[in-house]
Image (tube, rainbow, N blue to C red):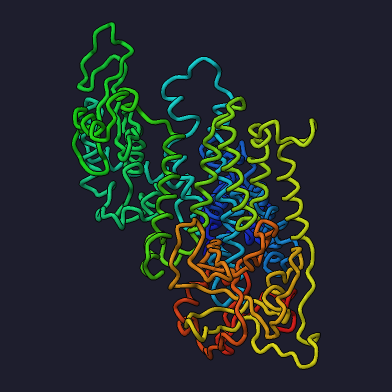
């Protein structure tokens, strides 16, 4: 019988594919010199790199290396580098889950790994429910991954900033001017990245989906290479409609403003491919470039068409134009959202006439640049949110308006608005002498910083990398405190304060320290029901100093005055309201005259905090634990629950994606959430 050693190298190499890289290093390489040589074969380690890690930071140029010369890369070193990185990331994630101290610092360290961290973070976002700290591990891993995704989105939009900074007084070529340093599908896909979480569909995957769709179109279209521009354009429009790739199946006033319709990645991945006209036109344009002809969105008032350009000097029907028109490009229009036929120019002009627009048609019937398409998409996202907050219906009926994947509706609200503000900042060209643009930009930055401080403090690195340098360019000279002080100094100082609070320990609240005669009935992690309004919630903390005491439980705010005359305990709670009616204010609700309910959607369900109406919310640093509702002990009663997640009330199950911010897991035997706030409430 032949021994294993008698097998040829090629066969042993294939066998090693079925062993883990760790086994190859620790065992196979030590067998003998021959096996040591085979265990260090570059082809084997390239295979390990390809199969062990799906996501790679762009700086590695990984896929270029895969296509290049095998021996130009130390594949084993590259694999070990990723393995060591995962080990450091694992340690940082463990630290984030275990303690609130320096949580933001550890998050930023992981974000510096970029996409090299994504493979490991995804395993933690999807960790098994049997894990001791399943809720906390999922929540914080997803929080870090969200920040990395936002970094990639903003990096994509930053290409426009770099483009406008390098263009000279000489007008750039038409295609370059329209793209603005970006690719349309990636610039729009950046919005998806803000709400991607642990799902498929990043920028590269969006491009791959478009590549696949384009390949299917080419395969279904015979003799496409010899077709005229008009024939190609109409063929693509018809193919998209026949395959339900654009538009809406139910374009009613209600479903039209669903958030999912604003996202190109969602439209491509969804079985029904729902999209607004601007996204349909963008999909068409991206596929046109892959099919061999030129097309762009044409954004008109209340409509977006696709405009197709014939090659210079050639008509849409393939006929050479007269010599004096050698540089002219004929155009045609299509409506990928609602039709599969060419749209006559007369029809578009009549539409403009009905809107009262009688002049300037030639300037409007031109391709719209990518930066303006991004801005219009941001406006559509704002309109979706406006529709969500103004419809007077129970929350359960509003959920489909902002739900992208089952159960993620609550995590999408604030990121969607955040993406809109970031886009409005990044799509402004470098125009330091334009006072009007500079002023508008500063207003947008104020909105962004409010969101950052309140909901996304883990994005300090993004503010420092992108906003602060732009702030120094755009800020009016009058804002400088002195000739040497940069306008961004105030922002940088606030970031330093956030980091100081993040690194500091907070004094704990102990039941054993309570004076005689004072008793706190309920504990952190208990599920309760409101006696009057019947909603459910989870207790996050308690105080015996009145509602003012729990508002400032972190002792970082100057508002330390407890409410005199209130002797009963108050509880800081997490809850979902299903009965609130939105007011015309952006974040306001109809509330009692004594208190203000301020919406705080913070990557999760409607988490509300009740604040003294005299308090200034801008005086508070929102590092963590900023979303709460304060309820008196006499207003609630504990709910007796035993069993898995299925025994939880529906509104509590909606809180599970956000519960990890405060809790490790659900204790099915004792019917409570296991606290991850031991540093603040060590005896609960």
Q: Residue at x 22, y 25 (%)?
A: 228
Q: Is residue 386 left or right of residue 632?
A: left
Q: Residue at x 23, y 18 (%)?
A: 315
Q: Is residue 101 left or right of residue 136?
A: right
Q: Is residue 486 left or right of residue 142?
A: right
Which quadrant holds residue 19?
bottom right
- The image shows residue 497, relative to residue 303, as above or below, that is below
Which quadrant holds residue 329?
top left
> Quarter holding the C terminus?
bottom right
Q: Nearer the viewer, residue 579 or 459?
A: 579
Q: Residue at x 48, y 58 (%)?
A: 413
Where residue 543 appears, as percent x and y from the top left, is: 71, 79
Q: Nearer the viewer, residue 423 or 173?
A: 423
Toward the bottom, the furthest residue is 517
- The image shows residue 18, relative to residue 176, as above or below, that is below
- The image shows residue 168, relative to residue 344, as above or below, that is above
The answer to whether residue 381 shows anywhere in this view is: yes
Q: Nearer the viewer, residue 115 or 150?
A: 150
- The image shows residue 198, relative to residue 579, as above or below, that is above
Q: Residue at x 64, y 48 (%)?
A: 76
Where residue 450 appears, as percent x and y from the top left, is: 61, 52
Where residue 123 appears, as percent x and y from the top left, is: 56, 63
Q: Nearer the viewer, residue 469 or 204?
A: 469
Where residue 555 appears, as percent x and y from the top left, is: 76, 68
Q: Is residue 122 left or right of residue 564?
A: left
């Amino acid at each position: 019988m032949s021994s294993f050693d008698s097998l040829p190298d090629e066969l042993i190499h294939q066998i090693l594919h079925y062993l883990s890289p760790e086994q190859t290093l620790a065992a196979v390489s030590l067998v003998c010199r021959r096996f040591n040589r085979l265990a260090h074969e570059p082809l084997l380690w390239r295979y390990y790199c390809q199969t062990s890690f799906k996501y790679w930071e762009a700086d590695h140029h990984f896929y270029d290396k895969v296509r290049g010369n095998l021996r130009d890369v130390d594949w084993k070193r590259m694999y070990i580098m990723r393995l060591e990185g995962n080990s450091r990331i694992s340690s940082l994630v463990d630290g984030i889950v275990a303690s609130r101290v320096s949580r933001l610092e550890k998050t930023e360290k992981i974000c510096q790994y970029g996409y090299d961290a994504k493979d490991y973070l995804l395993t933690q976002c999807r960790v098994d429910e049997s894990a001791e700290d399943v809720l906390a591990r999922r929540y914080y891993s997803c929080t870090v991954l969200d920040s990395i995704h936002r970094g990639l989105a903003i990096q994509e939009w930053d290409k426009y900033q770099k483009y406008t900074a390098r263009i000279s007084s000489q007008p750039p070529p038409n295609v370059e001017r329209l793209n603005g340093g970006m690719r349309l599908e990636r610039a729009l896909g950046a919005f998806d990245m803000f709400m991607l979480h642990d799902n498929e569909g990043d920028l590269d995957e969006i491009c791959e989906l478009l590549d696949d769709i384009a390949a299917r179109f080419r395969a279904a279209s015979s003799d496409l290479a010899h077709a005229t521009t008009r024939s190609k354009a109409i063929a693509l429009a018809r193919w998209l409609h026949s395959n339900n790739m654009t538009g809406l199946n139910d374009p009613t006033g209600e479903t039209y403003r669903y958030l999912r319709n604003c996202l190109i990645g969602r439209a491509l991945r969804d079985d029904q491919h729902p999209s607004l006209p601007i996204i349909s036109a963008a999909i068409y344009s991206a596929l046109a470039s892959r099919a061999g002809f030129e097309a762009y969105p044409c954004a008109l008032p209340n409509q977006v068409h696709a405009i197709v350009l014939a090659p210079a000097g050639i008509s849409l029907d393939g006929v050479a134009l007269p010599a004096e028109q050698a540089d002219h490009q004929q155009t045609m229009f299509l409506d990928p959202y609602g039709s599969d036929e060419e749209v006559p120019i007369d029809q578009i002009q009549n539409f403009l006439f009905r809107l009262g627009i009688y002049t300037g048609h030639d300037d409007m019937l031109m391709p719209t640049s990518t930066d303006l398409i991004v801005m219009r998409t941001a406006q559509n996202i704002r309109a979706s949110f406006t529709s969500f907050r103004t419809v007077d219906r129970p929350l359960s009926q509003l959920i489909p308006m902002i739900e992208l994947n089952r159960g993620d509706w609550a995590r999408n609200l604030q990121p969607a608005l955040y993406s809109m503000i970031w886009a409005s900042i990044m799509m402004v060209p470098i125009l330091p002498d334009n006072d009007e643009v500079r002023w508008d930009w500063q207003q947008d930055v104020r909105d962004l910083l409010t969101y950052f401080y309140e909901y996304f403090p883990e994005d300090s690195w993004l503010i420092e990398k992108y906003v602060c340098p732009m702030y120094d360019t755009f800020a009016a000279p009058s804002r400088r405190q002195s000739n040497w002080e940069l306008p961004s100094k105030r922002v940088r100082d606030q970031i330093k304060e956030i980091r100081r609070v993040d690194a500091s320990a907070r004094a704990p609240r102990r039941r054993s320290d309570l004076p005689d005669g004072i008793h706190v009935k309920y504990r952190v992690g208990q599920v309760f029901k409101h006696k009057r309004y019947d909603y459910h919630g989870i207790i996050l903390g308690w105080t015996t100093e009145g509602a003012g005491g729990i508002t400032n439980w972190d002792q970082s705010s100057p508002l330390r005055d407890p409410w005199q005359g209130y002797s009963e305990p108050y509880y800081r709670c997490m809850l979902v309201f299903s009965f609130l009616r939105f007011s015309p204010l952006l974040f306001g609700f109809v509330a009692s005259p004594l208190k203000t309910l301020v919406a705080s959607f913070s990557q999760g369900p409607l988490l509300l905090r009740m604040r003294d109406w005299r308090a200034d919310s801008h005086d508070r640093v929102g590092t963590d634990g900023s979303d709460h509702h304060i309820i008196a002990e006499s207003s609630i009663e504990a709910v007796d629950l035993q069993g898995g997640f299925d025994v939880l009330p529906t509104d509590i199950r909606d809180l599970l994606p956000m519960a990890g911010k405060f809790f490790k897991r659900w204790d099915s035997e004792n019917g409570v959430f296991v606290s991850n706030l031991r540093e603040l409430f060590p005896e609960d």
